[in-house]
Image (tube, coloured by chain):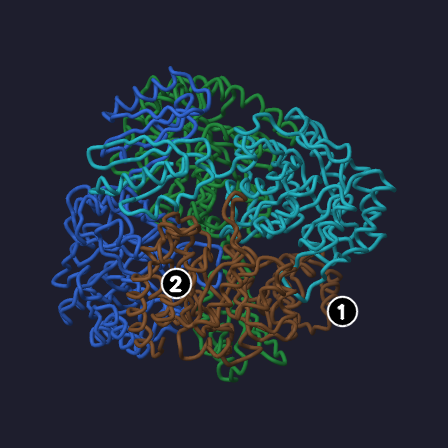
Chain colours: A cyan, B brown, C green, D blue
Amino acid sequence: MIIEMSRGATKDQVDHVVERAHSFGFEVQLNLGTEKTVVAILGSDTGKVQTDAFAVLPGVQSVTRVMKPYKLASREFHSKPSKINVSGVEIGGQRVVIMAGPCAVESEKQLMETARAVKECGAAIVRGGAFKPRTSPFSFQGLEEDALKMLVKVKSDFDIPVITEVLDIENVELIAKHADILQVGARNMQNFALLKRLSKLRHPILLKRGLSATIAEWLTAADYLLAEGNRRVILCERGVRTFEDSVRFSLDISSIPVIKRFSHLPIIVDPSHAAGHFAYVPSIAKAAIAAGADGLLIEVHPNPQEALIDGLQSLTIPDFKRLMTELRTIAEAVGRVI
Amino acid sequence: MIIEMSRGATKDQVDHVVERAHSFGFEVQLNLGTEKTVVAILGSDTGKVQTDAFAVLPGVQSVTRVMKPYKLASREFHSKPSKINVSGVEIGGQRVVIMAGPCAVESEKQLMETARAVKECGAAIVRGGAFKPRTSPFSFQGLEEDALKMLVKVKSDFDIPVITEVLDIENVELIAKHADILQVGARNMQNFALLKRLSKLRHPILLKRGLSATIAEWLTAADYLLAEGNRRVILCERGVRTFEDSVRFSLDISSIPVIKRFSHLPIIVDPSHAAGHFAYVPSIAKAAIAAGADGLLIEVHPNPQEALIDGLQSLTIPDFKRLMTELRTIAEAVGRVI
Amino acid sequence: MIIEMSRGATKDQVDHVVERAHSFGFEVQLNLGTEKTVVAILGSDTGKVQTDAFAVLPGVQSVTRVMKPYKLASREFHSKPSKINVSGVEIGGQRVVIMAGPCAVESEKQLMETARAVKECGAAIVRGGAFKPRTSPFSFQGLEEDALKMLVKVKSDFDIPVITEVLDIENVELIAKHADILQVGARNMQNFALLKRLSKLRHPILLKRGLSATIAEWLTAADYLLAEGNRRVILCERGVRTFEDSVRFSLDISSIPVIKRFSHLPIIVDPSHAAGHFAYVPSIAKAAIAAGADGLLIEVHPNPQEALIDGLQSLTIPDFKRLMTELRTIAEAVGRVI
Amino acid sequence: MIIEMSRGATKDQVDHVVERAHSFGFEVQLNLGTEKTVVAILGSDTGKVQTDAFAVLPGVQSVTRVMKPYKLASREFHSKPSKINVSGVEIGGQRVVIMAGPCAVESEKQLMETARAVKECGAAIVRGGAFKPRTSPFSFQGLEEDALKMLVKVKSDFDIPVITEVLDIENVELIAKHADILQVGARNMQNFALLKRLSKLRHPILLKRGLSATIAEWLTAADYLLAEGNRRVILCERGVRTFEDSVRFSLDISSIPVIKRFSHLPIIVDPSHAAGHFAYVPSIAKAAIAAGADGLLIEVHPNPQEALIDGLQSLTIPDFKRLMTELRTIAEAVGRVI
């Protein structure tokens, strides 16, 4: 951390800053400029201390963090990319992993039909929402436990892992019993009570980026999940909130190379929630693979016009089939397979 | 809702839209323009149906919502401003209600000293965090149940209501037993599991605006709390995420007149979390009252330099005292009292 | 346009709205709901009238635009994609057009060396800044007219078109005499004086997206350029301002399919200015082509460490060569060539 | 500037950074941490050098600026608040200066009627647009030179200074001849050609904040105006672009205390363009004065329903009169007058 003292800061004020740094066990180096004093705080753990601890002291003009606030999710902590095994499917390796299925499980027929189709097209994992976070209390809230049972049937009938969202701490154990990956939604990225509970599991967790979270905040939330020893965390970019109103969220394509540079965790992309419209899903999906994403999370519905949720962003089964062919070509162009 | 059909949409496609509208019980009026057909969907409950239900149909170019997606929180539902009684303190009336206290309860001594001081200065409610949402798992997480007991002592010793944050559904009952107002933090504004649980209580709830929530989304979240008959919901603007980096969050001052126009719920402002720096708190606090806010939530600490959390945004007791004098003058200038 | 009247609006107020619509030559259809009156304003030119013209009338609650505010740039005006000829190079056709070169022309040696190299690697157009918009008045402002002469030498020596930026109306004629494409920078996207002057030319214009412009505003700015009959307008996505601070600007990858859906104009992508760092340029460049961009604008410098401007986002010549090989594979994967 | 070297950076790489710092005339202090080397670059002029000059060097992980990029506009350059004399009216002093008038001059009658009324209500300066920046080429573009003549008539008839916008370098001299303050609009904040031309004048300039400009960028743009010795620069906050769609722009109320802390320039607020709706103007105007703004720029129209531009955000004359009474009370509450 770098502390810039105000012009005219007294020696006592500088000493106070130095003492506080020592109290945290950090070393200090003083840069006595002609106009201002700058104090450099040294140590490998400065990321754990808030900048406020220094900014609040008298005579301090600004505090700048040099070290990142996250640690366990960083490349410096773990220099090689993590490969995560999900019931036999490797995420973060050479294969680009496609997770596909309906936004919400609406019936056994709908789920089984979709699961069969996406598996045939090459999807490696089936998605399906059981508990749904809805912005309005008057909307369909999911089939809940019944949906979980149908997902179990998908696993046994089609021999394919499943992913579903966990909304709150009450259902963690229930969902962990049935799903191969537990998904934390964008609106829960900083639901710390939920993150702490999940950190005690040893299940793969998919952590969606919050809709206005910086990449540093996202990786700090991942640290919560990694803090108790669980190593199987997968990141999912799903678009962020901007002023642009032609899409639901603006997919941050740059997050892929940024995450690859600063973190060892695999990153996949959800083009469906970002776009909010099926017409934009193929372009974004192809872009994500070209940019280096390790997988995709795509919504597919046998009849989007009748979908209870998010039909507009769902691909039909024939559209998904066509897209998979295109995605394979892109994956090969960047030296990967689907 | 207004459905714009594509140029060249067929009669069958238009009929399909009309049928779907009828299936929801809505009436329809067709506008057959020279170039395009526009379908107006009429009915007082169109806000409950997602635009996607129509956007997904073939031949539809765009769907525009005219009615707001929220209902119970709207002025159209309840035309007069709601006044909310919190253990004898009225929020939303002529008095501007100041809630003040430490970000986190750190010790009985710290809490009692602050509570006594802010009450003497004219604060009507004492705030103090027991369970703290922290962006890093390595940071201080609050004194939890011990802090609740200290808050109860504040109530009995100083005869003043207290407000504290509820982080997750597990602690709802515990906190409801001790606090006069339960606060839902910005990161939980769309934690629907938590909102649903809270909606079953009859306690006053303070709902902070999510850090990238639109006002419409905020009022829709308020609908969750109001859906089961609880009427005592207070809104709290605390700044939104923008590109500006000189403050922690950009306080959206316009939200005050917008909320007053479209909702009957009282709105208060938290200048401390928005600013992130004590130096900006007084200006924002004064602006909020001048703009018509019904109250403020301000962080005060007897010794901000030693605060375990957010010391930089906390006012000292003398600074708070000085600010209260200024706030009184502003309140009078807009025809209110503190 | 759809006018929602307030509850309780009088017949006179509705009549007033209707009269105003008629005064613009529009037709009107009334939707007399049980709770509210909704007035639909019909006509193919409603995009030309501001919503304020109705919103300001008494009894009006809201005005919603159904038609887009732009016209000449829209697919409805010109249904087939425009292909733009730039001195023999077609933009918007099957070939993905790579424009490459230094951010600023710094010397004849630097420019010629870069131009030769990028042409050998397959670039179709050479870029080079002569007049530079700098955020600080103390920074290098470009070689100006001398740079234009060097660009002319590139054209004659290497038989390749050149693109350079025009900063203000004073230099429009001078630059138009030398350059094949005139570039309008992001900060000038709504410099209407400049746009109007350029609309009188018949030169190809590249219009960068403003750093906080919506796609609708961008296409409306394109309407300025198209208004006098110039048809050769090329759009360039270069990232928008968001809260994310790990990149200079967040490239809006979704703008590619959105533009393709609503406009006939070709769209290229500038990964260099978005990323702000050479390490992210390849991922974004590949993503752009996969998403359907018609070209790229990339900064290349023979020695980025000595660049006077934006060295950090410039590729070295060997890095550019390597990237071109990868881009070719991606282009083929989406059925195009470079 | 603080340079963080990568883990494992070589001694040669560190030496390279040090040499570059010396080449700019800066001093250097090395912090040899156990894991990483951190290089502190010292000197009062480091703000003039781009961080890229170091970030581009091999072995560098990050570069963090401690000093601000602007200089002449800063409090460190000029520690006392600047008071600016505009034809006898002082801006930045004890008086809160109200500038009011129509968005665009539409006719002599409209302008004279408004000017007379706002002066009677206590406005100190009359505003009126002669050249209008319009997002659509099909909209009314202003009365141009005729409007300037009408503004001159206002000055002589009512003995009050006038402010009008300058859109491009071609009209700088013309407008400077007639207006007391030249206004640079938000979309021109980084039109550097225009800023440079204006910097050669000795007229008061009002610099509006760009709609997505950070405060640091705004003050750096002010440096352009101050660079040639003109000292009379006034800042104007007019709202920034965010995701919130209930207002046209989100007024950044915090910019007032931030500017007061870091700059000596006066700051006024334009509530009309931020709100986009007359109903929100009074709340924002009152908030601005309470927060410490030195003035307001308010749109007033004798008949907003017939205004050619921005009628929705204009106050009627009776509404303006009522607001002025309220503003006076607020101004007094913060120790100022109107």
Q: Chain of mark 2?
A: B
Is the residue B74 above or below the residue C78 in the image? below
Give the number of the disc on residue B23.
1
A96 vs B254, left or right, is right
Q: Are marks 1 and 2 on the same chain?
A: yes
Instruction: Give coordinates of residue D39: x percent, y percent.
Output: 34, 26
Label 1: which secondary element: helix
Residue type (three-letter) at the residue carrying disc 1: Ser
Q: Chain of mark 1?
A: B
Residue type (three-letter) at the residue carrying disc 2: Thr
Query: In the rendered image, which quarter contains the C terminus of chain A?
Result: top right
- Residue C16 visible in this rendered orientation of the protein: yes
- Residue C45 visible in this rendered orientation of the protein: no
Q: Where, by quadrant of the figure, is residue D38 drawn? A: top left
Instruction: Give coordinates of residue A234: x percent, y percent.
Output: 64, 38
Q: Nearer the viewer, residue C226 or A175?
A: A175
Q: What is the distance, in whole Å, between disc 1 and disc 2 at their CAs? A: 59 Å
Q: Where, by quadrant of the figure, is residue C144 drawn? A: top left
Is the residue C215 above or below the residue A68 in the image? below
Q: Which residue is mark 2?
A: B114
Instruction: Give coordinates of residue C27: x percent, y percent.
Output: 55, 71
A82 vs C296, left or right, is right
